[in-house]
């Protein structure tokens, strides 16, 4: 039984935030003015337990769930995350299990994550220049070479690795080609993400969005023509291309070329609410049900009610929403 929303989009992909905390303060995601020392993060008792997360995943497997991505906040701040990976892997061998990380702690955990059954990691890296990196991530504790070490260790451990770069005009355009070279040397796919108006705190302006088309021009000047990747999946967020040498570049053009029409993603916040869009203003609480011993059938029925009523198309209607909507923060529901 596949769950279809009001636009006939199936629920195939669940992104699970396992913490709202992070060791970075990226200016486009958790700006320090809003996420400073007085910010109140979720207390431990509000976080879903790993068993509760597994119950949600198990409830969705018969409904067509194919992919789970662990995210946050920074998921590797939960130092026992491999326990969750192992539990999720045990729910079904065909579940595609991925994790998105800022890479600071990846070299420490990559091997145990791979051994526990994780298939893939996406590593966020916005600059190789240490000064630009420190300004964007607003951290002095991690350097770009720490993140590159994480990438190399993950590759050695057998994980599938991709790199994501958010490009912000006037901030890190000069990093596009150095990052492309570093990924090409390693044979790691690199995806450029347009700066998005997620949440309410990142002072987003259209003028700061560097379009995927602009980045593609730069890449083609350096690497030659890009050809569309064979086997591009319908529900993939990135438009994937390859160079003549086989290096993959992707473009996540959520602002200039929205892809809501194929969006099959639901998000589970760290405190157990289900969100049907990255730009939602409110979620649907599952934690209360989970804590009243709901069965997987009960949870599936609750999610079915929410999903079948889903009509989200925020990115396609962005202009109409500007300034009018309170949106949940990305670090809370998971990117
Ligand atoms: N902390 C992890 C990380 O940075 O990879 C996982 C969570 S983070 C919210 C997930 C992804 O969202 C990252 O790749 C990050 O670059 C991206 N992101 C956060 N804010 C964004 C924004 N305003 N526009 C585009 N991407 C954003
Ligand atoms: Fe943290 Fe990731 Fe957000 Fe940066 S993008 S502040 S690393 S959650
Ligand atoms: Fe999906 Fe919402 Fe993003 Fe559109 S705006 S692609 S519906 S998460």
Image (cartoon, helix red, strand yellow):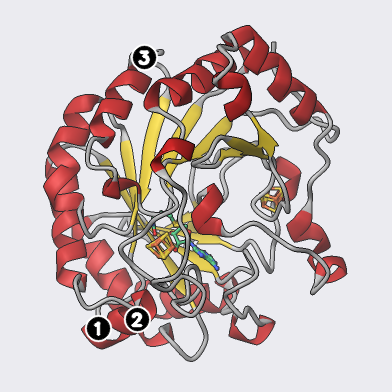
Give the class, few, some or many, for how many residues have Cα within 10 Å of label 1's Cα (few <14, many ≥20).
Answer: some
| Residue lying at 65% horizontally and 16% vertically, measured from the top left | 300
Viewer-proximal residue among 307 and 173: 307
| Residue lying at 49% horizontally and 30% vertically, measured from the top left | 67
Report whether 169 appears left or right of 189: right
**Upstream in sequence: badge 2 or badge 1:** 1
Q: Which residue is mark 2?
A: 175
User: How far apart in space, not on screen, are marks 2 and 1 (Cα)?
Assistant: 7 Å
Residue 215 pos. (x, y %): 50, 76
Q: Quadrant of ligand 2?
A: bottom left
Q: Which residue is mark 1?
A: 129
User: How far apart in space, not on screen, are marks 3 and 1 (Cα)?
Assistant: 40 Å
Residue 232 pos. (x, y %): 54, 42
Q: Is residue 120 above or below residue 167?
A: above
Residue 154 pos. (x, y %): 18, 46
Query: Is the CB of mark 1 within 8 Å of ligand 1?
Result: no
Report whether 53 appears left or right of 304: left
Asked if the residue at tag 1 contacts the one at tag 2, i.e. Cβ–Cβ closer than 8 Å, the answer is: yes
Dot 3: what SS?
loop
Q: Disc 2 vs disc 3: which is toward the camera? A: 3
Q: Which residue is mark 3?
A: 93
Res 4 quadrant in image: top right
Q: Disc 2 vs disc 1: which is toward the camera? A: 1
| Residue lying at 22% horizontally and 60% vertically, measured from the top left | 104
Q: How many marks?
A: 3
């Amino acid at each position: 039984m596949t769950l279809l929303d009001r636009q006939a989009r199936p629920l195939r992909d669940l992104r699970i935030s396992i913490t709202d905390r992070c060791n970075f303060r990226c200016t486009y995601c958790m700006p320090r003015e809003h996420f400073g020392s007085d910010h109140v993060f979720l207390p431990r008792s509000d976080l879903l337990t790993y068993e509760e997360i597994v119950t949600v995943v198990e409830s969705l497997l018969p409904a067509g769930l194919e992919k789970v991505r662990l995210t946050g906040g920074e998921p590797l701040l939960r130092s026992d995350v491999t326990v969750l990976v192992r539990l999720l892997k045990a729910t079904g061998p065909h579940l595609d299990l991925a994790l998105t990380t800022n890479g600071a702690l990846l070299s420490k955990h990559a091997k145990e994550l791979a051994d526990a059954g994780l298939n893939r990691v996406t590593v966020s890296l916005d600059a190789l220049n240490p000064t630009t990196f420190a300004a964007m991530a607003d951290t002095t504790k991690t350097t770009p070479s720490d993140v590159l070490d994480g990438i190399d260790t993950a590759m050695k451990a057998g994980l599938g690795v991709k790199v994501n770069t958010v490009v912000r005009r006037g901030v890190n355009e000069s990093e596009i080609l150095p990052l492309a070279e570093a990924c090409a040397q390693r044979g790691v796919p690199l995806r450029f993400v347009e700066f998005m108006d997620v949440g309410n705190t990142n002072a987003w302006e259209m003028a700061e969005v560097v379009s995927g088309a602009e980045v593609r021009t730069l890449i083609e000047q350096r690497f030659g023509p890009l050809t569309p990747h064979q086997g591009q999946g319908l529900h993939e967020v990135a438009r994937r291309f390859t160079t003549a040498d086989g290096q993959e570049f992707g473009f996540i053009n959520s602002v200039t070329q929205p892809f809501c029409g194929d969006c099959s993603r639901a998000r589970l916040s760290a405190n157990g609410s289900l969100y049907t869009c990255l730009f939602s203003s409110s979620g649907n609480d599952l934690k209360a049900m989970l804590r009243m011993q709901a069965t997987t059938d009960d949870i599936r029925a609750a999610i079915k009610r929410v999903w079948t009523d889903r009509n989200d198309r925020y990115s396609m209607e962005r202009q109409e929403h500007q300034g009018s909507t309170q949106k949940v923060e990305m670090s809370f529901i998971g990117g």
